[in-house]
Image (cartoon, rainbow, N blue to C red):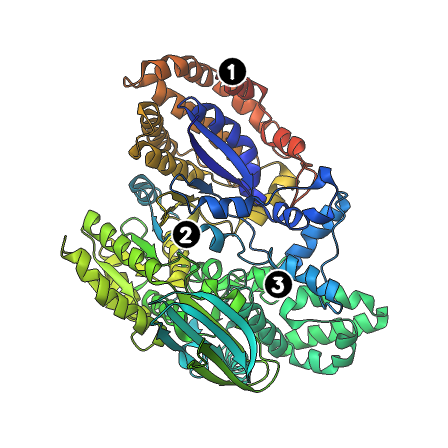
């Protein structure tokens, strides 16, 4: 087989779904002459690969992420990437503990490394933290949109958006000074070479891969101004009886945002941290790890002291405004774990729920949404104020907002992890070229958050090309969400003005360049008129908007197609968001019911096959692709998405229905007689045994499941749990 599709092995709910779906894909796709294989980039897999040199031979695992990192730079790359864990420190520690329990002789995670050995171990583990996968694989820019059939289904079967109260007080607040927006500087390099990042003349980092015409930007957030701002928001929420909530992206901004989160923890529980400063220092409390870590570590203290601290925390809650809850029943707040407050998953529900979030009593309450940095907060402010003024959106009529996102070559802030610093002393942070010329300079104080971020010219030009391509193909306006008052965006605008005319000379398009607040206003006017719009954004807004609009339009971002045309000529096909995956796993383990919807995987697979067909992979691939398109349409038309509750058909049943519709489409087509004859008996068996198969699939509903691990399941146990229908398995296995 000359053509290969790589299907990533990942974590949580989509990983469980793969145990059921992948055997079906192997048999169907293999029949078209295409090989499909799995590569393990799960958190556990990456941890094992990172420390394979310390493990016995039978526990070692190859570095599949490195393999894929090389593959995406080759024209034959065809990768279906499912959502993976962007690990926080607590998640990573839990994964390590599970692997250790399974017999893997891994070192503990050093929270406060002292020796050189501990520092080296911490550095190796750091490669598994946060969004370690996406920057490696995203060697291209992003094209995210809803398939027409998905958008039409959403209009016909609208999910509920709750109305806004007439006197709604919910609001978005952000810093007015000394944030990343305020302090940004930016340059366009005039030559390739090396730059250094220095604090008071001491080199913190060397960058040896700077290219000519690259956009280099840097900024910092003042810790003092941030703390003052947070304190003011807490007072404002208390005064106005609003639910206090903070919205960050610690999973992707894995260095800067946990620090911001830590300052929020410190301010909200200020009296507790002041009163028990000595004890907290002794047991190694790190405010950046949140209250969940604090609650765990105080168990080291005498029982009386634990009770004293818990009482002080409860007294703090009595004085403070209500705080948004991640899990009201379990008492998990907005400040327990940094990875629980992912802004692109937390702000869309604020709009969906009429400006409200859940409080400690399990009730919805209007919120004060705290988004410290102004750079992107204003667009959330605009949509919230629009909904308060004009009312909730109408799912049955609202237009579609697709996105072309700049993300190739680790573009912008999402690639800034290695160049983000918390200065250990007051002074001057400088970026210098190899001749010692100062390119950018900031006066900083100890504890501030400073970062450098980049966008390479080749990535920017390809992004502009892709935006023009989508606008010319659809006839829709392309709106570049760029703020001329931001130094970085001003330089990106220069690139748009330089390169876009080259493409417009071939075919004219409607385009606009607007700051995020104004771009949101323009877009929402079109949305309310039922008109579609292409948002053309940088990396962060790509992430934020491709959750915000799909959640409002479709009910979930998992139903969006995410196509990444790789710069080398291959394709990366991403399958949707995994933010709700942990809750899905919890329900499955307790009740045997997996409500994860694999539609994102179905759609990504169709695009993957389409690319192979367009590249001349053969008639069988085209037939397989056309049949899958029909199966996806039938899946939606017949409403076979998984039910949310135990006893309803779940993810396993959805795979059965996809297989049945796919086999029927193959059996009924006339382009390839061999495939038609091969799948006719398969379609017949699947259809005739529907009742029996569904009975077998539903027989495990309501029963707890043992899969041998959360981060690192036992493959045999997990496959048995996800393939309980002997009848279905025999039919699928019979396909040769």
Q: Which residue is mark 3?
A: 337
Q: Residues within 10 Å of mark 3 (few under 14, many from 20)?
A: many
Q: Quadrant of the N terminus?
A: top left
Mark 1 or mark 2: name the one nearer the start of the chain.
2
Out of 421 and 399, give the one closest to the viewer.
421
User: Would you say 243 lies left or right of 262 here?
Assistant: left
The residue wearing badge 1 is 734
> Is the Cβ of the residue at disc 2 closer than 8 Å to that at disc 3?
no
Q: Which mark is residue 139?
A: 2
Residue 548 position in % (x across, y down): 39, 57
Local secondary structure at mark 2? loop
Label 1: how many Cα within 10 Å (few below 14, some 14–19, many 20+): few
Residue 352: quadrant of the picture: bottom left
Residue 445 drawn above or below residue 570: below
Is residue 363 toward the left or the right of residue 461 in the image? right
Q: Earlier in the sequence, mark 2 or mark 3?
A: 2
Q: Residue furthest front?
A: 435
Element type at mark 3: loop
Residue at 32 percent across and 55 percent down: it is 404
Instruction: Residue at 42% x, 69% y: name it.
Output: 193
Give the Cα distance between marks 1 and 2. 39 Å
């Amino acid at each position: 087989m000359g053509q290969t599709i790589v299907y990533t092995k990942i974590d949580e709910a989509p990983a469980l779904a793969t145990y059921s779906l992948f055997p079906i894909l192997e048999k169907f796709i293999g029949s078209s002459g295409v090989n499909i294989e799995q590569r393990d980039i799960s958190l556990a897999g990456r941890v094992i690969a990172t420390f394979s040199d310390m493990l016995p031979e039978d526990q070692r695992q190859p570095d599949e992420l490195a393999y894929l990192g090389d593959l995406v730079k080759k024209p034959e790359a065809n990768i279906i990437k499912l959502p993976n864990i962007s690990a926080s420190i607590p998640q990573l520690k839990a994964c390590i503990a599970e692997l250790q329990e399974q017999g893997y002789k891994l070192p503990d995670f050093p929270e406060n490394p002292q020796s050189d050995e501990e520092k080296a171990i911490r550095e190796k583990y750091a490669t598994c933290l946060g969004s370690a996968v996406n920057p490696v694989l995203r060697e291209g820019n992003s094209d995210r949109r809803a398939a027409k059939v998905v958008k039409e289904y959403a209009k016909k079967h609208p999910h509920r958006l709750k109305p806004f109260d007439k006197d709604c007080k919910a609001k978005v607040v952000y810093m007015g000074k000394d944030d990343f927006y305020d302090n940004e500087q930016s340059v366009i390099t005039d030559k390739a070479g090396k730059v250094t990042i220095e604090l008071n003349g001491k080199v913190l980092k060397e960058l040896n891969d700077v290219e000519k015409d690259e956009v280099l930007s840097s900024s910092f957030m003042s810790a003092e101004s941030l703390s003052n701002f947070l304190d003011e928001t807490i007072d404002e929420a208390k005064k106005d009886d609003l639910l206090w909530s903070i919205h960050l992206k610690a999973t992707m901004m894995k260095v800067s945002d946990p620090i911001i989160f830590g300052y929020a923890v410190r301010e909200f529980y200020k009296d507790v941290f002041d009163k028990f400063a000595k004890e907290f220092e002794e047991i190694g409390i790190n405010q950046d790890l949140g209250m969940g870590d604090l609650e765990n570590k105080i168990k080291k203290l005498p029982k009386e002291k634990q009770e004293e601290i818990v009482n002080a925390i409860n007294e703090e809650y009595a004085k403070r405004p209500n705080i948004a809850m991640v899990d009201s029943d379990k008492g998990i707040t907005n400040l327990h774990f940094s990875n629980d407050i992912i802004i692109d998953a937390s702000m869309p529900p604020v709009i969906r729920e009429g400006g409200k979030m859940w409080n400690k009593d399990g009730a919805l309450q209007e919120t004060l949404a705290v988004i410290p940095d102004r750079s992107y907060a204003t667009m959330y402010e605009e949509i919230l104020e629009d909904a308060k003024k004009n009312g909730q959106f109408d799912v049955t009529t609202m237009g579609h907002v697709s996105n072309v996102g700049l993300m190739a070559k680790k573009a912008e802030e999402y690639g800034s992890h290695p160049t983000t610093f918390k200065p250990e002393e007051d002074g001057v942070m400088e970026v210098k070229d190899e001749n010692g010329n100062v390119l950018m300079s900031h006066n900083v104080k100890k504890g501030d958050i400073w970062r450098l971020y980049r966008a390479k010219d080749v990535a920017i030009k390809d992004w502009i090309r892709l935006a023009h391509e989508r606008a010319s193909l659809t006839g829709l306006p392309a709106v570049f969400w760029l703020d001329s008052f931001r130094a970085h965006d001003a330089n990106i605008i220069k690139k748009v003005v330089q390169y876009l005319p080259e493409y417009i000379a071939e075919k004219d398009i409607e385009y606009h360049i607007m700051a995020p607040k104004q771009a949101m206003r323009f877009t929402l006017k079109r949305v309310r008129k039922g008109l579609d719009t292409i948002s053309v954004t940088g990396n962060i807004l790509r992430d934020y908007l491709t959750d915000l609009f799909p959640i409002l339009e479709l009910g979930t971002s998992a139903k969006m197609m995410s196509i990444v045309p790789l710069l080398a000529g291959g394709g990366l096909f991403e399958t949707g968001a995994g933010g709700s995956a942990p809750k899905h796993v919890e329900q499955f383990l307790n009740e045997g019911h997996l409500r994860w919807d694999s539609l994102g995987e179905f759609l990504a697979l169709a695009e993957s096959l389409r690319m192979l067909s367009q590249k001349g992979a053969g008639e069988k691939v085209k037939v397989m692709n056309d049949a899958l398109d029909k199966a996806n349409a039938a899946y939606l038309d017949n409403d076979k998405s998984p039910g949310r509750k135990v006893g309803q058909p779940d993810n396993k049943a959805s795979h059965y229905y996809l297989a049945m519709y796919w086999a029927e489409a193959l059996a009924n087509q006339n382009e390839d007689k061999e495939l038609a004859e091969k799948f006719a008996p398969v379609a017949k068996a699947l259809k005739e045994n529907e009742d029996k198969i569904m009975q077998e699939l539903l027989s495990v509903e309501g029963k707890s499941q043992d899969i041998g691990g959360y981060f690192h399941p036992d493959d045999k146990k997990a496959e048995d749990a996800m393939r309980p229908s002997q009848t279905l398995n025999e039919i699928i296995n019979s396909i040769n």
